[in-house]
Image (spheres, rainbow, N blue to C red):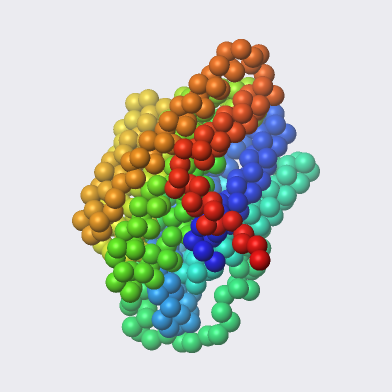
Amino acid sequence: MRIGQTSIVNFLSEIATTALGFFATLYVARALGSQGDDVLGVYFVIVAVVIWLRVVGNLGLQTAVKKRLSEGVEQEKYLVAGVLLQGVLFLVLAVVLLAAEPLLSGYLRGVPVVVVVGLLFATGAFKFVAAALDGLDLVHVSSVLTPLERTVRSLIQIGAIFLGFALTGLFAGYAAGAVVAALAGTLYVSPSVSLPSREHLVDLLSYARYAWLTSLSGRAFASMDTLVLGLFVADGLIGVYEVSWNLASVLAVFGASIARSMFPAISELSSEARRDEVAGLVTDSIRFAGLLLVPGLVGAAILQGEVLRIYGPEFTKGGVVLVVLVAARLVYVYLQQFVNALNAINRPDLAFRVQGVFFASNLGLNVLLVALYGWVGAAVATATSALVGLAAGYTAIRSVLAVEMPTAELARQAGAAALMGGVVLAGKAALPRTLPVALGLVALGAAVYGLVIVGISPALRGVIRDNLPRVG
Protein backbone atom coordinates (compact mmCIF):
# COMPACT_ATOMS: atom_id res chain seq x y z
CA MET A 1 0.00 0.00 0.00
CA ARG A 2 1.39 3.43 -0.98
CA ILE A 3 2.25 5.96 1.72
CA GLY A 4 -0.51 8.31 0.60
CA GLN A 5 -3.12 5.58 0.70
CA THR A 6 -1.90 4.43 4.12
CA SER A 7 -2.13 8.01 5.38
CA ILE A 8 -5.67 8.30 4.03
CA VAL A 9 -6.74 5.03 5.69
CA ASN A 10 -5.23 6.19 8.96
CA PHE A 11 -6.78 9.63 8.62
CA LEU A 12 -10.26 8.28 7.90
CA SER A 13 -9.92 5.91 10.84
CA GLU A 14 -8.89 8.79 13.10
CA ILE A 15 -11.79 10.89 11.83
CA ALA A 16 -14.20 8.06 12.59
CA THR A 17 -12.61 7.68 16.01
CA THR A 18 -12.84 11.38 16.72
CA ALA A 19 -16.45 11.54 15.58
CA LEU A 20 -17.37 8.67 17.88
CA GLY A 21 -15.59 10.33 20.78
CA PHE A 22 -17.26 13.64 20.00
CA PHE A 23 -20.77 12.22 20.07
CA ALA A 24 -20.08 10.13 23.17
CA THR A 25 -18.72 13.15 25.06
CA LEU A 26 -21.61 15.25 23.81
CA TYR A 27 -24.12 12.69 25.06
CA VAL A 28 -22.42 12.41 28.45
CA ALA A 29 -22.25 16.18 28.89
CA ARG A 30 -25.92 16.64 28.02
CA ALA A 31 -27.23 13.53 29.80
CA LEU A 32 -25.60 14.52 33.07
CA GLY A 33 -26.88 18.09 32.82
CA SER A 34 -25.30 20.63 35.14
CA GLN A 35 -23.06 17.93 36.65
CA GLY A 36 -21.62 16.95 33.27
CA ASP A 37 -18.53 19.17 33.46
CA ASP A 38 -17.69 17.92 36.99
CA VAL A 39 -18.02 14.22 36.13
CA LEU A 40 -16.04 14.70 32.94
CA GLY A 41 -13.45 16.64 34.92
CA VAL A 42 -12.84 13.69 37.28
CA TYR A 43 -12.86 11.24 34.35
CA PHE A 44 -10.33 13.25 32.35
CA VAL A 45 -8.01 13.62 35.35
CA ILE A 46 -7.98 9.83 35.93
CA VAL A 47 -7.49 9.15 32.22
CA ALA A 48 -4.58 11.61 32.16
CA VAL A 49 -3.02 9.82 35.14
CA VAL A 50 -3.44 6.42 33.43
CA ILE A 51 -1.89 7.65 30.20
CA TRP A 52 1.04 9.21 32.03
CA LEU A 53 1.60 6.01 33.97
CA ARG A 54 1.47 4.03 30.74
CA VAL A 55 4.15 6.23 29.22
CA VAL A 56 6.33 6.01 32.33
CA GLY A 57 5.81 2.24 32.53
CA ASN A 58 6.60 1.86 28.84
CA LEU A 59 9.98 3.66 29.03
CA GLY A 60 10.10 4.04 25.23
CA LEU A 61 9.87 0.29 24.71
CA GLN A 62 6.99 0.46 22.23
CA THR A 63 8.88 2.90 20.03
CA ALA A 64 11.92 0.61 20.17
CA VAL A 65 9.80 -2.40 19.19
CA LYS A 66 8.27 -0.48 16.29
CA LYS A 67 11.70 0.61 15.04
CA ARG A 68 13.31 -2.83 15.19
CA LEU A 69 10.32 -4.58 13.61
CA SER A 70 10.28 -2.01 10.79
CA GLU A 71 13.86 -3.01 9.87
CA GLY A 72 12.63 -6.50 8.91
CA VAL A 73 15.35 -8.49 10.70
CA GLU A 74 14.57 -11.18 13.31
CA GLN A 75 11.12 -9.76 13.87
CA GLU A 76 9.79 -12.69 15.90
CA LYS A 77 12.64 -12.44 18.41
CA TYR A 78 12.26 -8.69 18.84
CA LEU A 79 8.51 -9.06 19.27
CA VAL A 80 8.83 -11.67 22.03
CA ALA A 81 11.56 -9.64 23.71
CA GLY A 82 9.26 -6.64 23.70
CA VAL A 83 6.40 -8.61 25.25
CA LEU A 84 8.64 -9.92 28.03
CA LEU A 85 10.07 -6.50 28.87
CA GLN A 86 6.66 -4.87 28.76
CA GLY A 87 5.23 -7.46 31.15
CA VAL A 88 8.00 -6.93 33.68
CA LEU A 89 7.62 -3.15 33.54
CA PHE A 90 3.86 -3.37 34.09
CA LEU A 91 4.19 -5.66 37.10
CA VAL A 92 6.72 -3.38 38.76
CA LEU A 93 4.56 -0.30 38.21
CA ALA A 94 1.39 -2.06 39.43
CA VAL A 95 3.07 -3.09 42.70
CA VAL A 96 4.33 0.46 43.29
CA LEU A 97 0.88 1.95 42.65
CA LEU A 98 -0.92 -0.42 44.98
CA ALA A 99 1.62 0.24 47.72
CA ALA A 100 1.24 4.01 47.28
CA GLU A 101 -2.58 4.09 47.36
CA PRO A 102 -2.83 6.10 50.64
CA LEU A 103 -0.72 8.86 49.09
CA LEU A 104 -2.66 8.95 45.82
CA SER A 105 -6.28 8.78 46.96
CA GLY A 106 -6.71 12.54 47.34
CA TYR A 107 -5.49 13.46 43.87
CA LEU A 108 -7.43 10.54 42.35
CA ARG A 109 -10.68 11.98 43.76
CA GLY A 110 -11.32 8.78 45.72
CA VAL A 111 -11.11 6.47 42.69
CA PRO A 112 -9.51 3.17 43.85
CA VAL A 113 -5.97 2.53 42.64
CA VAL A 114 -6.99 -0.93 41.43
CA VAL A 115 -9.19 0.80 38.85
CA VAL A 116 -6.18 2.77 37.64
CA VAL A 117 -4.11 -0.44 37.43
CA GLY A 118 -6.83 -2.16 35.41
CA LEU A 119 -7.10 0.74 32.98
CA LEU A 120 -3.31 0.81 32.71
CA PHE A 121 -3.15 -2.88 31.75
CA ALA A 122 -5.93 -2.63 29.15
CA THR A 123 -4.65 0.48 27.40
CA GLY A 124 -1.01 -0.63 27.61
CA ALA A 125 -1.82 -3.91 25.86
CA PHE A 126 -3.68 -2.09 23.09
CA LYS A 127 -0.89 0.42 22.49
CA PHE A 128 1.74 -2.34 22.40
CA VAL A 129 -0.20 -4.29 19.77
CA ALA A 130 -0.71 -1.12 17.71
CA ALA A 131 3.03 -0.32 17.87
CA ALA A 132 3.90 -3.86 16.74
CA LEU A 133 1.53 -3.59 13.78
CA ASP A 134 3.03 -0.23 12.80
CA GLY A 135 6.51 -1.75 12.90
CA LEU A 136 5.36 -4.63 10.68
CA ASP A 137 4.19 -2.01 8.13
CA LEU A 138 0.55 -2.78 8.89
CA VAL A 139 -0.36 0.81 9.72
CA HIS A 140 -3.62 0.43 7.80
CA VAL A 141 -4.56 -2.47 10.10
CA SER A 142 -3.61 -0.74 13.34
CA SER A 143 -5.48 2.35 12.12
CA VAL A 144 -8.73 0.38 11.95
CA LEU A 145 -8.26 -0.81 15.53
CA THR A 146 -8.54 2.74 16.85
CA PRO A 147 -12.14 3.33 15.70
CA LEU A 148 -12.97 -0.19 16.89
CA GLU A 149 -11.64 0.70 20.33
CA ARG A 150 -13.55 3.96 20.37
CA THR A 151 -16.77 2.33 19.14
CA VAL A 152 -16.76 -0.24 21.93
CA ARG A 153 -15.81 2.42 24.46
CA SER A 154 -18.50 4.86 23.34
CA LEU A 155 -21.29 2.30 23.19
CA ILE A 156 -20.57 1.02 26.70
CA GLN A 157 -20.19 4.52 28.11
CA ILE A 158 -23.43 5.76 26.54
CA GLY A 159 -25.28 2.66 27.75
CA ALA A 160 -23.86 3.02 31.25
CA ILE A 161 -24.83 6.68 31.47
CA PHE A 162 -28.33 5.80 30.26
CA LEU A 163 -28.59 3.20 33.03
CA GLY A 164 -27.32 5.68 35.63
CA PHE A 165 -23.79 4.41 36.29
CA ALA A 166 -22.01 7.70 35.40
CA LEU A 167 -18.31 7.62 36.34
CA THR A 168 -18.13 3.83 36.76
CA GLY A 169 -19.59 3.37 33.29
CA LEU A 170 -17.08 5.78 31.77
CA PHE A 171 -14.18 3.76 33.20
CA ALA A 172 -15.74 0.42 32.17
CA GLY A 173 -16.11 1.59 28.58
CA TYR A 174 -12.55 2.93 28.51
CA ALA A 175 -11.13 -0.43 29.58
CA ALA A 176 -13.40 -2.64 27.47
CA GLY A 177 -12.65 -0.75 24.25
CA ALA A 178 -8.91 -1.18 24.72
CA VAL A 179 -9.18 -4.90 25.51
CA VAL A 180 -11.35 -5.66 22.47
CA ALA A 181 -9.04 -3.72 20.13
CA ALA A 182 -5.93 -5.40 21.55
CA LEU A 183 -7.41 -8.87 21.05
CA ALA A 184 -8.43 -8.01 17.49
CA GLY A 185 -4.97 -6.68 16.69
CA THR A 186 -3.19 -9.83 17.84
CA LEU A 187 -4.90 -11.72 15.00
CA TYR A 188 -2.72 -9.84 12.49
CA VAL A 189 0.59 -10.20 14.31
CA SER A 190 2.73 -13.10 13.10
CA PRO A 191 1.88 -16.17 15.24
CA SER A 192 5.41 -17.60 15.02
CA VAL A 193 7.37 -17.44 18.27
CA SER A 194 11.14 -17.36 18.61
CA LEU A 195 12.87 -16.92 21.94
CA PRO A 196 15.11 -13.85 21.99
CA SER A 197 18.69 -13.74 23.10
CA ARG A 198 20.17 -11.38 25.64
CA GLU A 199 21.36 -9.22 22.74
CA HIS A 200 17.78 -8.64 21.56
CA LEU A 201 16.72 -7.49 25.01
CA VAL A 202 19.73 -5.20 25.34
CA ASP A 203 19.19 -3.79 21.85
CA LEU A 204 15.59 -2.84 22.62
CA LEU A 205 16.55 -1.27 25.93
CA SER A 206 19.41 0.61 24.29
CA TYR A 207 17.08 2.23 21.77
CA ALA A 208 14.33 2.72 24.35
CA ARG A 209 16.55 4.69 26.72
CA TYR A 210 16.40 7.54 24.23
CA ALA A 211 12.92 6.90 22.82
CA TRP A 212 11.19 7.04 26.22
CA LEU A 213 11.48 10.81 26.32
CA THR A 214 9.77 11.05 22.93
CA SER A 215 6.80 9.19 24.37
CA LEU A 216 6.96 11.20 27.58
CA SER A 217 7.07 14.51 25.74
CA GLY A 218 4.21 13.53 23.47
CA ARG A 219 2.15 12.80 26.53
CA ALA A 220 3.34 16.02 28.16
CA PHE A 221 1.89 17.91 25.22
CA ALA A 222 -1.40 16.03 25.45
CA SER A 223 -1.99 16.10 29.18
CA MET A 224 0.68 17.81 31.26
CA ASP A 225 -1.74 20.72 31.49
CA THR A 226 -4.50 18.41 32.76
CA LEU A 227 -2.28 17.01 35.52
CA VAL A 228 -1.26 20.48 36.66
CA LEU A 229 -4.83 21.77 36.39
CA GLY A 230 -5.84 18.94 38.71
CA LEU A 231 -3.79 20.64 41.43
CA PHE A 232 -5.06 24.19 40.98
CA VAL A 233 -8.41 24.25 39.13
CA ALA A 234 -11.95 23.01 39.87
CA ASP A 235 -13.13 19.82 38.17
CA GLY A 236 -15.78 21.70 36.20
CA LEU A 237 -13.21 23.91 34.47
CA ILE A 238 -11.06 20.87 33.72
CA GLY A 239 -14.05 19.31 31.95
CA VAL A 240 -14.50 22.41 29.78
CA TYR A 241 -10.75 22.56 29.10
CA GLU A 242 -10.64 18.93 27.97
CA VAL A 243 -13.62 19.38 25.68
CA SER A 244 -11.79 22.30 24.07
CA TRP A 245 -8.65 20.17 23.78
CA ASN A 246 -10.58 17.33 22.14
CA LEU A 247 -12.03 19.72 19.58
CA ALA A 248 -8.55 21.02 18.81
CA SER A 249 -7.35 17.44 18.45
CA VAL A 250 -9.93 16.74 15.75
CA LEU A 251 -7.99 19.02 13.42
CA ALA A 252 -4.64 17.36 14.20
CA VAL A 253 -5.49 13.83 13.10
CA PHE A 254 -4.29 14.31 9.52
CA GLY A 255 -0.82 15.45 10.57
CA ALA A 256 -0.55 12.59 13.05
CA SER A 257 -1.62 10.16 10.34
CA ILE A 258 1.15 11.41 8.06
CA ALA A 259 3.80 10.90 10.74
CA ARG A 260 2.54 7.44 11.58
CA SER A 261 2.44 6.36 7.93
CA MET A 262 5.85 7.85 7.12
CA PHE A 263 7.73 6.06 9.91
CA PRO A 264 8.09 2.59 8.30
CA ALA A 265 9.01 4.07 4.91
CA ILE A 266 11.61 6.47 6.34
CA SER A 267 13.03 3.72 8.54
CA GLU A 268 13.46 1.34 5.61
CA LEU A 269 15.03 3.97 3.34
CA SER A 270 17.35 5.05 6.14
CA SER A 271 18.56 1.48 6.71
CA GLU A 272 19.46 1.41 2.99
CA ALA A 273 21.35 4.75 3.27
CA ARG A 274 19.03 6.50 0.77
CA ARG A 275 19.30 9.84 2.53
CA ASP A 276 18.06 12.07 -0.30
CA GLU A 277 14.81 10.11 -0.49
CA VAL A 278 14.47 10.28 3.28
CA ALA A 279 14.85 14.06 3.20
CA GLY A 280 12.22 14.24 0.47
CA LEU A 281 9.74 12.28 2.58
CA VAL A 282 10.34 14.54 5.56
CA THR A 283 9.72 17.60 3.38
CA ASP A 284 6.49 16.02 2.14
CA SER A 285 5.35 15.36 5.69
CA ILE A 286 5.89 19.01 6.59
CA ARG A 287 4.17 20.14 3.40
CA PHE A 288 0.84 18.55 4.31
CA ALA A 289 0.94 18.16 8.12
CA GLY A 290 -0.99 21.39 8.78
CA LEU A 291 -3.44 21.02 5.91
CA LEU A 292 -6.46 20.98 8.23
CA LEU A 293 -5.05 22.82 11.23
CA VAL A 294 -4.31 26.05 9.35
CA PRO A 295 -7.97 26.66 8.38
CA GLY A 296 -9.04 25.18 11.70
CA LEU A 297 -7.21 27.91 13.58
CA VAL A 298 -8.95 30.60 11.54
CA GLY A 299 -12.34 28.94 12.01
CA ALA A 300 -11.84 28.50 15.75
CA ALA A 301 -10.99 32.18 16.14
CA ILE A 302 -14.23 33.18 14.39
CA LEU A 303 -16.68 30.57 15.72
CA GLN A 304 -15.23 29.64 19.12
CA GLY A 305 -18.29 30.22 21.29
CA GLU A 306 -20.81 28.93 18.77
CA VAL A 307 -19.00 25.61 18.37
CA LEU A 308 -18.59 24.99 22.11
CA ARG A 309 -22.26 25.78 22.77
CA ILE A 310 -23.21 22.39 21.34
CA TYR A 311 -21.98 20.80 24.59
CA GLY A 312 -24.11 23.11 26.69
CA PRO A 313 -24.05 26.77 27.72
CA GLU A 314 -21.56 26.13 30.55
CA PHE A 315 -18.91 25.14 27.97
CA THR A 316 -18.91 28.43 26.03
CA LYS A 317 -16.51 30.01 28.52
CA GLY A 318 -13.74 27.93 26.96
CA GLY A 319 -13.63 29.96 23.71
CA VAL A 320 -10.25 31.63 24.22
CA VAL A 321 -8.74 28.39 25.48
CA LEU A 322 -9.97 26.60 22.35
CA VAL A 323 -8.23 29.07 20.02
CA VAL A 324 -4.93 28.86 21.91
CA LEU A 325 -5.05 25.05 21.96
CA VAL A 326 -5.69 24.87 18.22
CA ALA A 327 -2.63 27.10 17.71
CA ALA A 328 -0.65 24.78 19.98
CA ARG A 329 -1.77 21.79 17.95
CA LEU A 330 -0.70 23.51 14.72
CA VAL A 331 2.82 24.14 16.01
CA TYR A 332 3.15 20.69 17.55
CA VAL A 333 2.16 18.84 14.40
CA TYR A 334 5.30 20.15 12.68
CA LEU A 335 7.45 19.27 15.68
CA GLN A 336 5.91 15.79 15.48
CA GLN A 337 7.18 15.33 11.91
CA PHE A 338 10.76 16.23 12.93
CA VAL A 339 10.85 13.92 15.95
CA ASN A 340 9.22 11.10 13.98
CA ALA A 341 11.90 11.39 11.29
CA LEU A 342 14.75 11.47 13.81
CA ASN A 343 13.52 8.26 15.42
CA ALA A 344 12.96 6.62 12.03
CA ILE A 345 16.54 7.31 10.86
CA ASN A 346 17.86 5.70 14.04
CA ARG A 347 18.83 8.95 15.74
CA PRO A 348 16.84 8.64 18.97
CA ASP A 349 19.66 10.54 20.69
CA LEU A 350 18.78 13.70 18.76
CA ALA A 351 15.06 13.11 19.28
CA PHE A 352 15.84 12.72 22.98
CA ARG A 353 17.48 16.14 23.11
CA VAL A 354 14.64 17.82 21.25
CA GLN A 355 12.02 16.24 23.47
CA GLY A 356 14.06 17.06 26.55
CA VAL A 357 13.91 20.74 25.65
CA PHE A 358 10.19 20.51 24.97
CA PHE A 359 9.41 18.53 28.12
CA ALA A 360 11.34 20.86 30.42
CA SER A 361 9.69 23.96 28.97
CA ASN A 362 6.24 22.35 29.04
CA LEU A 363 6.51 21.30 32.68
CA GLY A 364 8.02 24.56 33.88
CA LEU A 365 5.61 26.80 31.98
CA ASN A 366 2.55 24.80 33.03
CA VAL A 367 3.39 24.96 36.72
CA LEU A 368 4.19 28.67 36.52
CA LEU A 369 1.37 29.86 34.27
CA VAL A 370 -1.38 27.66 35.74
CA ALA A 371 -0.51 28.91 39.21
CA LEU A 372 -0.66 32.52 37.95
CA TYR A 373 -3.44 32.49 35.34
CA GLY A 374 -5.39 29.25 35.75
CA TRP A 375 -6.65 27.34 32.74
CA VAL A 376 -5.77 30.06 30.21
CA GLY A 377 -2.21 29.84 31.51
CA ALA A 378 -2.25 26.08 30.83
CA ALA A 379 -3.22 26.66 27.20
CA VAL A 380 -0.56 29.36 26.73
CA ALA A 381 2.06 27.11 28.35
CA THR A 382 1.20 24.28 25.96
CA ALA A 383 1.45 26.52 22.90
CA THR A 384 4.68 28.23 24.01
CA SER A 385 6.46 24.98 24.81
CA ALA A 386 5.44 23.63 21.39
CA LEU A 387 7.17 26.64 19.78
CA VAL A 388 10.32 26.00 21.82
CA GLY A 389 10.28 22.34 20.81
CA LEU A 390 9.71 23.20 17.15
CA ALA A 391 12.81 25.39 17.08
CA ALA A 392 14.88 22.60 18.67
CA GLY A 393 13.41 20.02 16.27
CA TYR A 394 14.17 22.08 13.19
CA THR A 395 17.77 22.59 14.30
CA ALA A 396 18.21 18.87 14.96
CA ILE A 397 16.73 17.62 11.69
CA ARG A 398 18.75 20.12 9.64
CA SER A 399 21.95 18.85 11.28
CA VAL A 400 21.49 15.38 9.77
CA LEU A 401 19.27 15.78 6.69
CA ALA A 402 19.04 18.31 3.88
CA VAL A 403 15.36 18.94 4.52
CA GLU A 404 13.82 21.77 2.51
CA MET A 405 11.02 23.80 4.06
CA PRO A 406 8.03 23.93 1.68
CA THR A 407 7.36 27.63 2.29
CA ALA A 408 5.37 28.14 -0.92
CA GLU A 409 2.93 25.37 -0.02
CA LEU A 410 2.52 26.65 3.53
CA ALA A 411 1.82 30.12 2.13
CA ARG A 412 -0.88 28.69 -0.15
CA GLN A 413 -2.58 27.05 2.82
CA ALA A 414 -2.48 30.30 4.77
CA GLY A 415 -3.95 32.21 1.82
CA ALA A 416 -6.77 29.71 1.32
CA ALA A 417 -7.53 29.82 5.05
CA ALA A 418 -7.64 33.63 5.01
CA LEU A 419 -10.12 33.61 2.13
CA MET A 420 -12.23 31.03 3.96
CA GLY A 421 -12.13 33.18 7.08
CA GLY A 422 -13.47 36.17 5.18
CA VAL A 423 -16.43 34.18 3.90
CA VAL A 424 -17.23 32.74 7.33
CA LEU A 425 -16.86 36.12 9.04
CA ALA A 426 -19.25 37.71 6.53
CA GLY A 427 -21.76 34.92 7.10
CA LYS A 428 -21.50 35.27 10.87
CA ALA A 429 -22.18 39.01 10.65
CA ALA A 430 -25.18 38.59 8.36
CA LEU A 431 -26.89 35.56 9.93
CA PRO A 432 -28.43 34.91 13.38
CA ARG A 433 -26.16 33.29 15.97
CA THR A 434 -27.79 29.90 16.33
CA LEU A 435 -26.28 26.42 16.45
CA PRO A 436 -27.62 25.34 13.01
CA VAL A 437 -26.17 28.51 11.48
CA ALA A 438 -22.80 27.87 13.16
CA LEU A 439 -22.68 24.31 11.84
CA GLY A 440 -23.65 25.58 8.40
CA LEU A 441 -20.82 28.12 8.50
CA VAL A 442 -18.37 25.37 9.47
CA ALA A 443 -19.48 23.34 6.44
CA LEU A 444 -19.33 26.40 4.18
CA GLY A 445 -15.84 27.26 5.40
CA ALA A 446 -14.61 23.72 4.83
CA ALA A 447 -16.01 23.72 1.30
CA VAL A 448 -14.45 27.09 0.44
CA TYR A 449 -11.05 26.11 1.82
CA GLY A 450 -11.11 22.72 0.11
CA LEU A 451 -11.96 24.14 -3.30
CA VAL A 452 -9.42 26.96 -3.05
CA ILE A 453 -6.49 24.86 -1.80
CA VAL A 454 -7.04 22.16 -4.42
CA GLY A 455 -7.24 24.86 -7.08
CA ILE A 456 -4.02 26.66 -6.12
CA SER A 457 -1.85 23.72 -4.95
CA PRO A 458 -0.24 21.61 -7.71
CA ALA A 459 1.41 19.43 -5.06
CA LEU A 460 -1.92 18.56 -3.44
CA ARG A 461 -3.51 17.81 -6.81
CA GLY A 462 -0.58 15.52 -7.60
CA VAL A 463 -1.00 13.62 -4.32
CA ILE A 464 -4.72 13.20 -4.99
CA ARG A 465 -4.07 11.86 -8.51
CA ASP A 466 -1.34 9.47 -7.34
CA ASN A 467 -3.52 7.93 -4.64
CA LEU A 468 -6.85 7.63 -6.39
CA PRO A 469 -7.88 4.01 -7.06
CA ARG A 470 -6.65 2.91 -10.48
CA VAL A 471 -9.18 1.51 -12.94
CA GLY A 472 -8.31 -1.18 -15.49
Mark yes or no: residue 187 visible: yes
Say left or right for 444 vs 136.
right
Say left or right for 55 vs 23.
left
Q: In the rendered view of the protein, which quadrant contains the N terminus?
A: bottom right
With respect to residue 134, does 189 lie above or below? below
Residue 79 percent across, percent down from the top left: 47, 77
Q: Residue at the spot x=47%, y=31% of the render?
A: 417
Residue 320 percent across, percent down from the top left: 47, 24
Q: Nearer the viewer, residue 165 or 148?
A: 148
Q: Residue at the spot x=69%, y=29% of the render?
A: 33
Residue 189 percent across, percent down from the top left: 57, 75
Residue 175 percent across, percent down from the top left: 62, 56
Q: Residue at the spot x=45%, y=80% of the render?
A: 75
Q: Residue at the spot x=41%, y=81% of the render?
A: 73
With respect to residue 259, does 20 lie above or below? above
Mark yes or no: residue 34 visible: no
With respect to residue 347, does 225 lie above or below? above
Q: Quadrant of residue 116?
A: bottom right
Q: Nearer the viewer, residue 400 or 417?
A: 417
